[in-house]
Amino acid sequence: MPRRTRIVRPLLLGALLACAPAAGRTAGQPASARFPPQFTRAEVFLSALRANPQPPVARRRVSGLTVPHHLLAADLMVRGFRIAEGQRYRKIVVLLPDHYKRARRPFATTRRSFDTVFGPVAVSAADVELLLKNRELVEDSALFAREHAIGALLPFLRHFFPDTPVVPIAIAISSTREQWERLVADLEGVVTADTLIVQSTDFSHYLPLGEALVRDQQVLNVLAANDLDAVARLQQPAHLDSRGAQYVQMRLQESHFRARPLAVLHANSQDYSKMSESRTTSYIVQVYAPPDPSLAVDPSDPAAAQMFCFAGDTFFGRDVLRMLSRPGVGERVRGEMRARLGACPLIVNLEGVLVDEVPEGLGPMRLAMPSALALDWLRALNVVAASVANNHARDLGDAAREEMARRLEEAGIRVLRHGRVEDLGPLRVVALTDRDESAHPRGQRISADDLDGIARSPAAPPLVAFLHWGTEWETAPGARELALADALRERAVSLIVGAHPHRASSGVVALAGGEAQLAYSLGNFVFDQTGERATGAVLELRVFPHGTFFTRLIPIPNFYDRMRRAN
């Protein structure tokens, strides 16, 4: 907890507890059987509710939330809960740390309900009794009377979900992964399709801001990879105050809802102070929702994060050109692409050369496309940058490549060249190709000089390397790609994104326990290869105000197949 919070918070707690209003009773339960409110001034919660009227992302069915429990960050708590506002749940499982080590067993719950400044919150008695059957693992505890990890959330739970009972579960700091797995098994009879799982967690603790942000990015990388092994290796409290709560949340979401974490907000206690703090606490709001194949990129609150999307091989020539020349095809497919991408600024790997007219007799391995058509599509899809660091950029020679670069820049599209770091505002991007830029490419072009040049770059983080590499049709990196990824990580590259294999990888990988991220292949975006062999994905990138970021790899349809069906 930061110094300012350590000084102010006890005074605030004393003032709040001194002016507790009368609380309503839970039906059928005497007042002595309920915990009294920990925080007793309604205005603390009402002011946060009034100041944050809108959710940071579009509303959809939510199965889980991760929110802070410091009232210093009450605005983030409200913005998290608003994402699930208006949805009906039969119960809410609350996962929280046992800060003060009062539990004698790995987990604790309670039969007692709670009073809050907004009224009572009942416990789901049958579910609590089910958990308490495992006496070796779970105990009935009074620790909830003074545990702020639930006390700070209860008024908001009462406000947003007034008739929904809770299943509180405190997780001992010393609990183990084997015990977390046993709890997940016991919760099989508790968690149902209409359960909301709320994880009460604060992240990096007691660190200067710069070090806190490094730790937070490591956590964000682990979350993006949905890597449970890496979660189990995180440090308490340097990364977060409860590995167990994060682990159990992710396990339950995966097994019950097929949901993965989406980090939508990241902040630090320094944001709430005008003075420089030597010890800070960080906050990461996460949302979990079952996958919806009709959705792709989620809109973002500009105050919370700036969005970018990376897409793979993009080409508007050959058979794509023939498909788009037919009436109505382009409009239909473009409409679907816009619906999936929204207004996300797009960064693509542009395969081939822009020309006024496509020469005849090019052959299958030399790629060209009409400038007017390609630029029209790139602008319509909100492409802000295009990599020409690939094995088709010089298919018509150096002069044609330079003319293409000029036309892209005139259209307001940043050109990403091999080894040159480009500043795109919230992030820096360097394009690299491991294939020679010619019609008959040779492999392993990226050299030690290229890597050292990146290391010497003064580019501020986050630095993204957009690579053209790998083996066609392979969705996992080989030894060469893993070595390059590790070399880039050691040179302060935060995110490594790949194209060229024409098939998309299944997910993001956290490198070195979370020091960087790897999305090996995005496959195809627009390319004349059918879905029988080729697949594609978009990498959604959210850059938060501190320069930290979160990614999601989102599968997309084969748009070439869509063009063929539209005929």
Image (cartoon, rainbow, N blue to C red):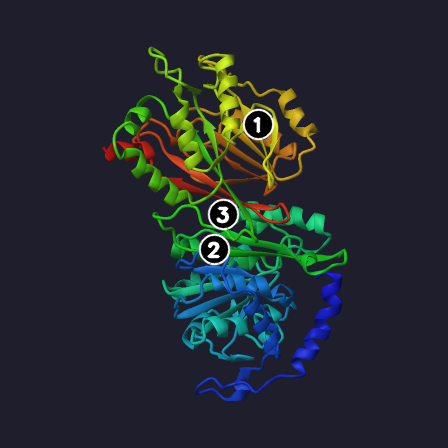
Identify the amino acid type marked 3: Asn
Q: Nearer the viewer, residue 458 or 220?
A: 458
Residue at the farthest top position: 361
Q: Which residue is mark 2?
A: 57
Kind of element beneath mark 3:
loop
Which quadrant: the C terminus? top left
Q: CA distance from mark 1 to mark 3?
A: 23 Å
Identify the amino acid type marked 2: Val
- The answer to whether 88 appears left or right of 428 in the picture is left
Residue 90: x %, y % from top left? 39, 70
Residue at x-position 45% and y-position 19%: 392
Q: Nearer the viewer, residue 277 or 337?
A: 337
Q: Counting other residues with Cα less than 10 Å from the Cα at mark 1, is it few (<14), some (14-19), or many (20 or more)? A: some
The disc label shown at residue 448, or none: none
Residue 33: x %, y % from top left? 52, 85
Residue at x-position 57% and y-position 48%: 220
Residue 84: x %, y % from top left? 45, 63
Q: CA distance from mark 2 to mark 1?
A: 35 Å
- The answer to whether 415 appears left or right of 327 in the picture is right
Q: Which residue is mark 3?
A: 226
Q: Quadrant of residue 472?
A: top left
Q: Earlier in the sequence, mark 1 or mark 3?
A: 3
Q: Counting other residues with Cα less than 10 Å from the Cα at mark 2, is it few (<14), some (14-19), or many (20 or more)? A: some
Q: Is disc 3 in contact with disc 2, using a CB cutoff of under 8 Å?
A: no
| Residue 370 appears in the figure | yes
Identify the amino acid type marked 1: Leu
In this rendering, is residue 211 above or below 128? above
Kind of element beneath mark 1:
helix
Q: Nearer the viewer, mark 3 or mark 2?
A: 2
| Residue 473 appears in the figure | no
